[in-house]
Image: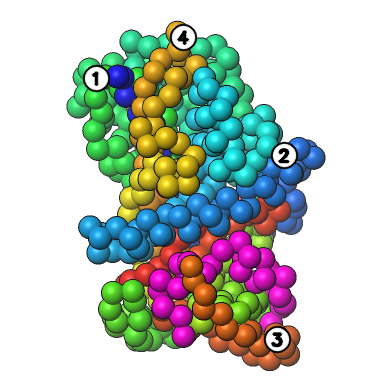
């Protein structure tokens, strides 16, 4: 059986500057007065799809966390993923599957009802996300590298170019070293040098490699968000052990603050507010295993519904995490793909039978200057939440495992998300 190899690389980089010095780096966001935040213009169908995907973003994050926490071979339990790129990946995949039944399984996992609407939403996001905030630099890319022994169908080629802006090239997979070097060089350039070796190997029998990349870099909305002079030592009570780390301390500021029976949340804005870092902190009485099982779409809804603008100070550790996620394991566990991952692929002419492997390589870093991230695509415990007093001053200390999400305001698109378990 031929192996259809789908290598997924999503990269999201976020850097929030303390100063306003200009830079010649083409990856820097524009150094100018923030433009006014405006909603991305979505059609009725793609608006519905963007809403349907909100639950997927939370579910995909939780499923990746669960797999990491239960993997006895992994001592590092941190998780960072890109739900948006995974959604685009699965959208592209659905367009290439011959079986309508299998495509419907993937659509059901995404929570969507219309593949064409997913294609339309992907096209809109690829066109619009880069320009919603002139204080942010965002670049999304898709590439399809086809073994020259095979041919993509005209219909698939058209959809990939029209809706996913994919670069398509036919390459010599037999010259493995040269091809691997070239494709990793492309990935490294697309991700601002953050992911230099995303693809570890390639086989002459592979039919194609599909790649999604994402790069994101932005200034904090408050240019003086973190003063390095306020950084202090503290203990992070991790999943495996306690560690002494540097905690950054933010200015007290009006922020969206929410509470639920088990969690509290706050929002830190980037640039003109089009993008934000959404932080979710568990109640201190919870264990890491409770955290991973109790944070779900219902908890997320409670946090959102309770949110009010309050005076909030944030204490959060400096960290850098990297990792790899096997997307096949997530989809197999959810029943979205068969354990053999074997399909008939109508994306080729003639159709080809083969397997698919999907991976995501990630990195996320945060310090006083900002955050840099890269991705290459039962619990029964319950506590009573106190009502929020908008006149009260709150302090959130992230000294235990917590969630993070980087989102676009108007569509809810989740560029990056994850779970900090240990530092």
Q: Position of residue 220 (x, y in %)?
A: 56, 66
* Residue drawn 52% across the image and 69% down it: 294
Residue 391: which quarter of the image? Answer: bottom right
- Say whether marks 2 and 3 touch (CB < 8 Å): no
N-term-proximal mark, 3 vs 4: 4
Question: Mark 2: which secondary structure?
Answer: helix
Tell me, yes or no, whether the highlighted magenta stretch contains residue 392.
no
- Say whether marks 1 and 2 touch (CB < 8 Å): no
Question: Mark 3: which secondary structure?
Answer: loop
Horizontally, is 280 left or right of 348 in the view?
right
Tell me, yes or no, whether the highlighted magenta stretch contains residue 297.
yes
Task: Report how many numbered discs are placed on residues in the image.
Answer: 4
Q: Give the alpha-carbon distance from disc 2 to disc 3, as whole Å.
A: 36 Å
The residue pinned by badge 1 equals 204
* Residue drawn 29% across the image and 82% down it: 242
The residue pinned by badge 2 equals 46
Q: Which mark is residue 387?
A: 3
Tell me, yes or no, if residue 138 can be seen here. no
Please state the extent of the stretch shown in magenta in the rendering. 285-310
Quick one: label 1, few (<14), some, or many (20+) residues within 10 Å? some
95 vs 382, nearest the viewer? 382
């Amino acid at each position: 059986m031929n192996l259809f190899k789908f290598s997924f690389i999503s990269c999201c980089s976020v850097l929030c500057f303390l100063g306003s010095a200009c830079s010649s780096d083409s990856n820097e966001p524009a150094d100018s007065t923030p433009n006014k935040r405006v909603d991305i213009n979505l059609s009725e169908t793609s608006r519905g799809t963007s809403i349907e995907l909100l639950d997927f973003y939370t579910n995909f994050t939780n499923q990746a966390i669960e797999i990491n926490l239960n993997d006895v071979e992994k001592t590092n339990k941190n998780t960072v993923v890109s739900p948006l790129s995974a959604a685009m990946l699965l959208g592209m995949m659905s367009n290439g599957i011959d079986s309508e039944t299998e495509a419907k399984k993937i659509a059901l996992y995404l929570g969507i009802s219309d593949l064409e609407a997913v294609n339309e939403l992907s096209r809109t996001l690829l066109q619009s996300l880069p320009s919603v905030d002139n204080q942010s630099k965002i670049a999304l890319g898709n590439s399809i590298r086809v073994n020259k022994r095979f041919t993509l169908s005209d219909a698939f080629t058209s959809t990939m170019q029209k809706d996913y802006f994919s670069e398509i090239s036919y390459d010599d997979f037999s010259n493995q070293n040269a091809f691997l070097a070239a494709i990793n060089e492309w990935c490294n350039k697309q991700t601002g040098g953050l992911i230099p070796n995303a693809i570890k190997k390639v086989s002459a029998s592979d039919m194609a490699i599909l790649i999604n990349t994402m790069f994101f870099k932005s200034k904090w909305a408050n240019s003086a968000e973190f003063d390095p002079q306020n950084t202090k030592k503290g203990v992070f009570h991790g999943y495996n052990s306690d560690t002494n780390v540097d905690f950054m301390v933010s200015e007290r500021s009006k922020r969206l603050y929410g509470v639920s029976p088990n969690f509290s949340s706050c929002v830190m804005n980037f640039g003109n507010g089009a993008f934000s870092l959404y932080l979710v902190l568990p109640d201190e009485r919870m264990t890491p295993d409770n955290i991973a099982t109790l944070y779900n779409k219902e908890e997320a809804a409670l946090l959102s519904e309770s949110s009010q603008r309050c005076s909030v100070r944030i204490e959060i550790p400096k960290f850098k995490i990297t990792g790899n996620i096997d997307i096949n394991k997530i989809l197999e566990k959810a029943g979205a793909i068969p354990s053999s991952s074997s399909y008939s692929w109508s994306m080729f002419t003639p159709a080809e039978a083969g397997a698919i492997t999907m991976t995501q390589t990630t990195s996320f870093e945060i310090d006083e200057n900002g955050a840099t991230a890269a991705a290459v695509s039962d619990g029964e415990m319950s506590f009573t939440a106190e009502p929020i007093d908008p006149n009260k001053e709150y302090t959130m200390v992230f000294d235990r495992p917590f969630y993070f999400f980087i989102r676009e305001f108007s569509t809810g698109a989740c560029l990056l998300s994850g779970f900090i378990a240990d530092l």
